[in-house]
Amino acid sequence: MAVAQRMSEADYVEFVNSGVDGVWELHDGRLVEKPGMSWSHGDIITKLLVLLFQQLDRTEYHVFTELRVRRPSATIFLPDLMVVPTAYGEPFRDRPVLAIFSDPLPLVVEIWSPSTGEYDVDTKAPVYMQRGDLEIWRIHPYERTLTRWVRQPDGAYDESVHRDGTIALAALPSVTIDLDALFAG
């Protein structure tokens, strides 16, 4: 559900902190409620979270769901999953403030769902690219595909589609994800 009234980032933070029900994003100044997700959506997030936790040095990186990223024009998204360098958390540690990350992330993941599938590719992926995120994934749990955009040295993104096998993360090459395990029932 989108709310017609435009709002600033400060108004958004106040709104979210007010305790209102729902999970909310800010799309170019418009408040948008993030819809509920399916079993398969949650299953992929949980499996990916575990696979990343098993391989990442937690003194260097954290894996989050339901935290926020921003770009300068009143847009704040909640990726389904993201890998965040631990140093990015310093401004938020031990402070009761909403964590919103501006700096590029090593990995941002969106899981396809019927309610947001095309939006994630058409709108969110380009914003993640504008932010300079190093690797962007869109996982389709029903087609069992991973669409991957990897930032190149010139700032362009190389796109590829994967259905099986093992993927080594571009910014974290010691981390690999087995797609067969990720898509296993």
Image (cartoon, helix red, strand yellow):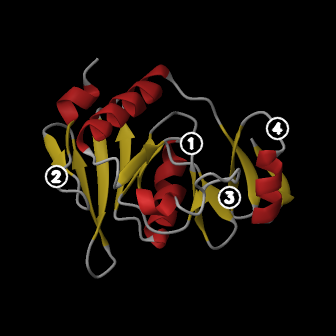
Position of the N terminus by quadrant: top right
The disc label shown at residue 66, or none:
1
Q: Along the polypeptide, which appears first: circle 1 or circle 2?
A: 1
Q: Nearer the viewer, mark 3 or mark 1?
A: 1
Residue 136 lies, with reference to residue 115, above or below; the image says below
Measured as percent of width and height from the top left, residue 39 is found at 47, 20
Q: Residues within 10 Å of mark 2 (few under 14, many from 20)?
A: few
Amino acid bearing label 3: His
Q: Circle 2 sits on which residue?
A: 174
**Separation of residues labelled 2 and 3 (CA atoms):** 34 Å
**Separation of residues labelled 1 and 4 (CA atoms):** 15 Å
Measured as percent of width and height from the top left, residue 112 is found at 45, 38
Q: Circle 3 sits on which residue?
A: 27
Residue 52 lies, with reference to residue 27, above or below; the image says above
**Separation of residues labelled 1 and 2 (CA atoms):** 25 Å
Q: Residues within 10 Å of mark 3 (few under 14, many from 20)?
A: some
Residue 35 lies, with reference to residue 24, above or below; the image says above
Q: Along the polypeptide, which appears first: circle 2 or circle 3?
A: 3
Disc 4 is placed on an element classified as loop
